[in-house]
Amino acid sequence: MGYRIGYGEDIHAFKEGDFFPLAGVMIPGRAVIAHSDGDVIYHALMDALLGAASLGDIGELFPDDDARYAGISSSLLVKEVYRLVKEKGFALANVDIHLLLERPKILPYKEKMKENICSLLSLEADRVSLKAGTNEGFDSVGEGRAVKAIVSLLLEDKDGKPESH
């Protein structure tokens, strides 16, 4: 059995608005500039999955000039990406997520975010790590103008046999 490491990043600038999504949880206070719903955690997760499975990137699968994806829930896109990854014969071993955000603090939302990720990926809670930090006032994230997510993960190659879930 072989292993593949995936890595993904996403960043979105804030704009005036009522809420923005993080792992499917609506965080109050601002909105993000994006073609889809702008969920940086799900976008970084998709790129990590696609990269590990050598399936391209989210811009290739879901172009930002395609009206079908305008405002779409990123959870629907994660489901499609994960379907493609499993179809190629891979199983997801674990996911490590690092969210960078100055405010608001995400502790009140963290458990629901992790539940959403586990549910989308059919993973046990001990296979998903979700951490948050700040950039201590540096760059667009540190100045409170953007939110960023970084995801690393491990896929197991099931000898090319499609997964059944």
Image (cartoon, rainbow, N blue to C red):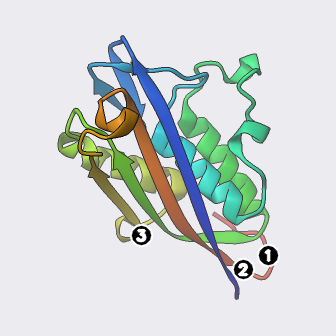
In the image, 36 versus 121, the foreground residue is 36
Q: Are marks 1 and 2 in contact (CB under 8 Å)?
A: yes
Residue 23 visible in image: no
Q: Which of marks 1 and 3 is in front?
A: 3
**Could you tell me which residue is drawn at 60 percent across and 37 percent down?**
76
Q: Quadrant of the C terminus?
A: bottom right
What amino acid does circle 2 point to? Answer: Lys
Q: Looking at the picture, does residue 102 appear above or below residue 66?
A: below
Q: How crowded is mark 3: few (under 14 residues within 10 Å), some or many (20 or more)?
A: few
Outermost residue toward the bottom in this view: 1
Q: Looking at the picture, does residue 9 appear above or below residue 7?
A: above
In the image, 125 versus 102, the foreground residue is 102
State which quadrant residue 49 falls in: bottom right
Q: Alpha-carbon distance for marks 1 and 3?
A: 22 Å
Task: Give the mark nearer the N terminus: 1 vs 3.
Answer: 3
| Residue corresponding to mark 2 | 158
| Relative horizontal placement of residue 81, taking residue 37 as reference (left or right) | right
| Residue corresponding to mark 1 | 161
Residue 133 visible in image: yes
| Relative horizontal placement of residue 38, taking residue 67 as reference (left or right) | left
Q: Residue 37: x and y, percent?
A: 52, 25
